[in-house]
């Protein structure tokens, strides 16, 4: 490897790496009037239409602190090692990923840095995950469409943290507005200065599994947007074999503010285990469905109130996404929105998804359509997912449509199914479907290369729990009157409202 | 009183030699084993099994018999090269159509050998070359086998004898049946492709049956197939029985 | 140092050889795909496990070292 001639000025000033090592965890405030108190944080200044321009963004939040500027591009040696000050800042803040897994960002950053230091590591790559294939989530495209500079700041900071020179900004192709806004934002910033990483905007498929970490990495590497077998994890070997940081859009937006206002400010909201604020997408029979910002630990009722209240009596709520967990409506009063509060109910917030189900809908029919959708979104790479999800969907369809035969012709690559496999085609004949559903859910859990079948298992298991009565009734009596109603669970549209109403003005700790 | 037949000697330049016997026998065994390997391969991919023949036995036998076929094939080539009767160089074993002895028909043998090598090497190194490359190479077996059969019928000096004709017919029937099972079974290919496969197989069989009487079973085949003229003088009269040792009709 | 069984579910094509060669730890679900009994492999099963991994036509069965 050819050694570059050392550039005297950068090194003499201590460059990024060594200066960062000498300074403490920064609490530099970017704005003279101090950081914003309470909410909104991310959604502050969100325009009713269009995107917040670069100038308005800098007026609102101030410039990034100079000590956290990205490293000079041309140097070898310590510039490839990332910024330990930034890593310490993220660790102190306790910022967790907002893509659904709630994984601590600091741990992920350190894993990428560690992998890049190993002999076969290579220079890291940052992938911004704006795929948002979850139909019940709109927060990421909201950020990309209306506040792209917040996301871009976060991406550049993440690149600085791991020492990456390349940022791949993945935006769902189903949102032309988000793609346009990001393209314009990049044009506003102009070409990267010396030392800044390059940012490439790429439209990614809106398929559900395409947003999975390894699927996205595979897509950016020129392959298909389907999950791959791990290990190696993307943080060790990702795009073109390099350590790759895959981070959700919202996570990076939080990073952009965290770097300006510090970890103490970040921890002023939320719970000790889940600090900060979060975006949730609320849909269903509520006056104003849409994207809201709240602090972790807020009661679910407070969210409903902020959204104008329910417009129909509620039967249940689905938390975490279309592959999430059902909670009975009777729990609505006591439930707070943070993973530690939801854990006793077996639920998580996931990618910040809250879907309400009215008492008028048939829960069995709704779950049936969800399971069939999950089955159709399978990457079709793993047998248990392909056959198991189809079998689950078939059983549900029998409950909703009567004894319509289901089942799948097993013609995937000549794969055969054992002769005694009952699949979904066996008719229930009035027997309770619950044991078969529970058995199938347990059978598919953990047996795919990604967590797609796990999500379906979780959805079904919680449905068996919450909708036990309806399921028994459908098993013995067949479809109910509400089965024929159109589904209540469409892809939610984001309600464009004033930012002060969108966020919870007075956080109530539950 | 007729003179006694010349003694068998490995390096005889005229008449029968041990190497020549070995070449023909190992070639025949190699063809038989290759046929078995194809049949087992189809049973394997069709996931056929029974209580006494579990999947791992079928799969393991397929692999072992393929390797054994390669062993016999290598012996077949070695003995052919070492036999100084016919001028077959080591190069001719790998590079088709360069030998001076029946160049085309021997060359087919080299083609079959190369194809089989490709299949077996990719199989042995499957973990390294990956599933896609392995699968693509494995399809070459369906080219290798008919080429090997044509080589046997065109090059071999026993083609007129009953045993080789019977062996060839049996092997052809087995492979035809295997192709039938494969195309009509759970092979995930469009109907057009399956039809082509079956049609190709049928066309090959019919073509072979039509060609044999005017080809290797016809008169003067040794000369027509490219035997060097220096060797032609050792031929006996046509129509000899299988118990006599002949170079060619 | 313990050894564990793992399946690459993408590579697995439900051939079923593994369940024949290591029935103590591998059974097949109703579609022919392997169900692994978790936990470390005792030394007497290790050879059989390796044989099963080698026999898999798609190299989907893995014998891995260490905790996971």
Image (cartoon, rainbow, N blue to C red):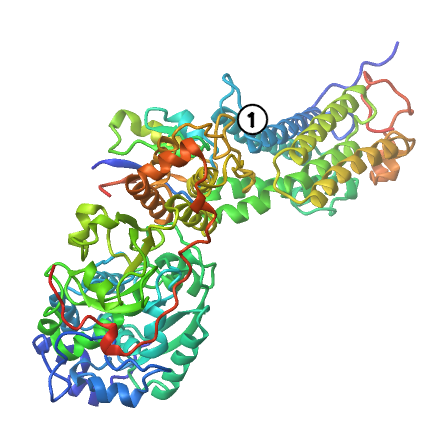
Residue A177 is drawn in which quadrant? bottom left
Please give left or right for residue A57 compared with residue A90 in the image: right
Residue at mark 1? B48
Q: Along the horizontal axis of the image, is A216 left or right of A420?
A: left
- Quarter of the figure with residue A267: bottom left
Image coordinates for residue B90, horizontal then vertical, percent: 65, 42
Q: Give me the residue at 40% from left, 75% from top.
A: A178
In the rendering, at what x and y percent does residue A249 appear? 31, 69
In the displayed structure, A314 sits above or below A307; it is above
Q: Can residue A8 be seen at all in this image of the molecule?
A: no
- Label 1 resides on the chain identified as B
In the rendered image, which quarter contains the C terminus of chain A?
bottom left
Could you tell me which quadrant the N terminus of chain A lies in? bottom left
Where is residue C47 shown, x and y percent of the image?
A: 33, 28
- Element class at badge 1: loop
> Whole-percent x and y of residue A335?
18, 54
> Which residue lies most toward the top here?
B1
Residue density around tag 1, few if under 14, some if 14–19, many if 20 or more, within 10 Å: some
Asked whether C12 or B25 is in front, the reply is: C12
Identify which residue is drawn at 39% across, 68% down.
A493
Residue in view at x 26 percent, y 48 percent: A327
* Residue A421 visible in this rendered orientation of the protein: yes
For the image shown, how many numbered marks are present on the structure? Answer: 1
């Amino acid at each position: 490897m050819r050694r570059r001639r050392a550039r005297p000025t950068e090194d003499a000033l201590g460059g990024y790496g060594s200066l960062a090592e000498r300074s403490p965890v920064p609490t530099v405030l970017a704005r003279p009037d101090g950081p914003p108190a309470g909410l909104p944080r991310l959604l502050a200044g969100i325009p009713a239409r269009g995107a917040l321009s670069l100038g308005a963004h800098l007026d609102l939040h101030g410039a990034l602190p100079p000590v956290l500027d990205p490293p000079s591009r041309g140097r070898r040696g310590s510039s490839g090692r990332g910024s330990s000050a930034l890593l310490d800042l993220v660790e102190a803040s306790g910022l967790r990923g907002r893509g659904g897994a709630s994984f601590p960002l600091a741990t992920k950053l350190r894993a990428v840095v560690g992998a890049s230091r190993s002999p076969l590591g290579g220079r890291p790559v940052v992938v911004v995950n704006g795929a948002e294939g979850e139909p019940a989530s709109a927060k990421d495209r909201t950020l990309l469409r209306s506040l792209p500079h917040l996301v871009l700041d976060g991406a550049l900071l993440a690149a600085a943290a791991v020492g990456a020179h390349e940022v791949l900004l993945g935006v769902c192709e189903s949102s032309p507005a988000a793609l346009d806004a990001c393209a314009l934002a990049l044009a506003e910033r102009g070409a990267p200065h010396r030392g800044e990483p390059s940012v490439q905007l790429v439209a990614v498929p809106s398929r559900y599994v395409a947003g999975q970490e390894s699927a996205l990495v595979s897509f950016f590497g020129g392959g298909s947007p389907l999950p791959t077998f791990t290990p190696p994890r993307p943080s060790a070997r990702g795009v073109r074999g390099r350590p790759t940081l895959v981070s959700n859009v919202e996570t990076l937006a939080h990073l952009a503010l965290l770097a300006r206002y510090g970890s103490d400010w970040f921890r002023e909201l939320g719970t000790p285990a889940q600090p900060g604020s979060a975006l949730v997408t609320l849909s269903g029979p509520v006056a104003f469905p849409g994207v809201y910002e709240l602090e972790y630990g807020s009661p679910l009722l407070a969210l409903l109130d902020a959204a104008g209240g329910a417009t129909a009596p509620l039967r249940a709520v689905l938390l975490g996404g279309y592959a999430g967990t059902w909670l009975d409506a009777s729990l609505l009063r006591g439930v707070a929105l943070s993973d530690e509060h939801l854990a006793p109910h077996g639920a998580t917030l996931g990618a910040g998804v809250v879907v309400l189900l009215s008492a008028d809908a048939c829960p069995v029919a709704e779950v049936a359509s969800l399971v069939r959708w999950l089955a159709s979104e399978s990457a079709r790479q793993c047998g248990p997912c392909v056959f198991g999800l189809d079998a689950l969907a078939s059983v549900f369809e029998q409950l909703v449509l009567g004894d319509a035969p289901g089942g799948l012709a097993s013609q995937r690559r000549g794969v055969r199914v054992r002769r005694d496999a009952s699949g979904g085609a066996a008719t229930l004949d009035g027997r309770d479907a619950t044991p078969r559903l529970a058995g199938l859910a347990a059978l598919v859990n953990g047996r795919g290369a990604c967590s797609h079948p796990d999500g379906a298992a979780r959805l079904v298991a919680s449905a068996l729990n919450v909708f036990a009565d309806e399921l028994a009734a459908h098993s013995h009596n067949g479809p109910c009157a509400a089965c024929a109603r159109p589904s209540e669970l469409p892809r939610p549209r984001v309600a464009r409202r004033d930012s002060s109403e969108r966020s919870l003005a007075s956080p109530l700790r539950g | 009183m007729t003179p006694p037949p010349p003694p068998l000697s490995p390096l005889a330049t005229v008449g029968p030699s041990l190497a020549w016997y070995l070449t023909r026998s190992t070639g025949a065994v190699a063809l038989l084993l290759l046929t078995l390997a194809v049949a087992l391969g189809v049973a394997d991919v069709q996931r056929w099994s029974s209580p006494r023949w579990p999947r791992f036995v079928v799969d393991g036998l397929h692999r072992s018999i393929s390797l054994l076929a390669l062993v016999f094939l290598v012996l077949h080539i070695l003995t052919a090269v070492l036999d100084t009767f016919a001028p077959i160089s080591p190069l001719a074993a790998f590079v088709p159509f360069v030998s001076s002895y029946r160049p085309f028909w021997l060359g087919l043998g080299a083609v079959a050998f190369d194809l089989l090598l490709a299949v077996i090497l990719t199989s042995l190194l499957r973990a390294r070359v990956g599933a896609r490359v392995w699968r693509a190479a494995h399809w070459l077996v369906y080219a290798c086998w008919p080429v090997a059969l044509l080589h046997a019928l065109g090059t071999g000096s026993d083609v007129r004898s009953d045993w080789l004709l019977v062996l060839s017919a049996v092997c052809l029937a087995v492979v035809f049946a295997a192709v039938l099972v494969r195309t009509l079974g759970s092979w995930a290919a469009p109907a057009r492709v399956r039809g082509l496969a079956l049609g190709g197989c049928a066309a090959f069989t019919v073509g072979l049956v039509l060609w044999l009487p005017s080809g290797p079973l016809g008169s003067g085949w040794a000369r027509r197939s490219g035997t060097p003229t220096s060797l032609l003088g050792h031929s006996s009269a046509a129509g000899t029985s299988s118990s006599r040792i002949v170079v060619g009709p | 140092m313990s050894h564990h069984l793992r399946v690459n579910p993408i590579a697995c094509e439900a051939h079923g050889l593994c369940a024949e060669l290591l029935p103590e730890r591998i059974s097949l679900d109703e579609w022919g795909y392997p169900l692994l009994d978790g936990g470390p492999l005792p030394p007497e099963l290790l050879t059989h496990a390796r044989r099963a991994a080698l026999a898999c036509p798609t190299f989907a069965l893995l014998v891995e070292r260490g905790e996971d």
